[in-house]
Amino acid sequence: MFYHAKELQFNARVSQPDPRFARLLLEQFGGANGELKAAMQYFTQAFTCKQPFPDKYDMLMDIATEEFSHLEIVGATIQMLLTGINGELKDASEQDDISTLLDGKASKESYIHEAMINPHFFAVSGGGPTVTDSNGYPWSGQYVDANGDPTVDMRSNMAAESRAKIVYEYLMKYTDDPYVKDTLRFLMTREVAHYQMFEAALATIQPNFPPGILQSDPRHSNTYYNLSKGQEARGPWNEGTSSQLGEGWQYIADPLSLVKETDGLTTLEAKGTDRTMNTVADADEMLAAERSGEIKAATPPGANQWSEYDKL
């Protein structure tokens, strides 16, 4: 059950209309890294967590709901930036809000053209936000990543927050409006906060690497293939010890020779690791039983009920 408070979470304001920036800001309304995408992603992920991971369900629903409030902030800002933009703009009095920013008919025509390269933003929406990105491409459910495993979903969410954060950074370079910058800075900061929430939630799931349940093949989990010619670059991604499995990186300077010598890597032996195929099989079985048991234990037999109203 959702309740809508008419007051925005953050006091969104604009100093003056700016249709061109309104169009750019659509990226965070209906774009691939925008607030609607985030809200729907976390909302969708929450369903599989309801019974086996109720704490994650609570967090995902809270953050999804906040993302809907951010969508409202973005939409409100776009609407304020479009003050004066409507189907009768060209015939409007020269005293309207937009006209005060312009100098003459040619300037107005140029301004409208730049702002309304996406015709739907003007002709269809009537001067309001549209569920599209800044180029007019409609929002799509394909933007949503929900894999049904919290160790995967939390990592997807950390990446989503990172992408949304950098988009707000970029957007802040295209406006000089101090009020709009305040709003963008708030939204950007909440991306940082959410990233840390998802990171903390991931840490409560142990083990959580590799994502999912099945472990990796020790013959291939620590090999780095030098697949480009020229100066070689070395770093913690191909020398020393791997960050999660603690295995020694095996730098393969001549991948083609190794592939030929091992019959397409099928006879390759594990090096730099204590893991074996037997220990991996045991770990697979143990973790599969643990995760399956968590879900089965949280799911009642027979009839099922989502909410317990007497506890509300």
Image: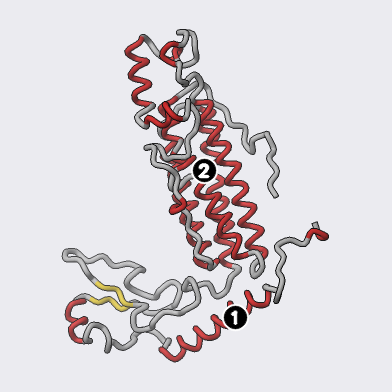
Residue visible at 16% across and 66% down?
A: 229
Residue visible at 42% across and 87% down?
A: 274
Viewer-side residue, 307 vs 304: 304
Decide which of tag 1 and tag 2 comes sooner along the chain: 2
Residue 280's place in the image compared with 132, above or below, is: below
Residue visible at 39% across and 41% down?
A: 137
Percent position of residue 2, x then y = 68, 47
Residue 310's place in the image compared with 209, above or below, is: above
Report crowding for label 2: few under 14, some 14 to 19, many 20 or more residues within 10 A (C-alpha). many
Report crowding for label 1: few under 14, some 14 to 19, many 20 or more residues within 10 A (C-alpha). few
Residue 312's place in the image compared with 70, above or below, is: below
Residue 58's place in the image compared with 225, above or below, is: above
Q: Which residue lies furthest to the right in this view?
A: 310
Percent position of residue 101, x then y = 43, 15
Q: Element under label 1? A: helix
The residue that disc 2 covers is 188
The residue that disc 1 covers is 290
Q: Which amino acid does label 2 sit on?
A: Met
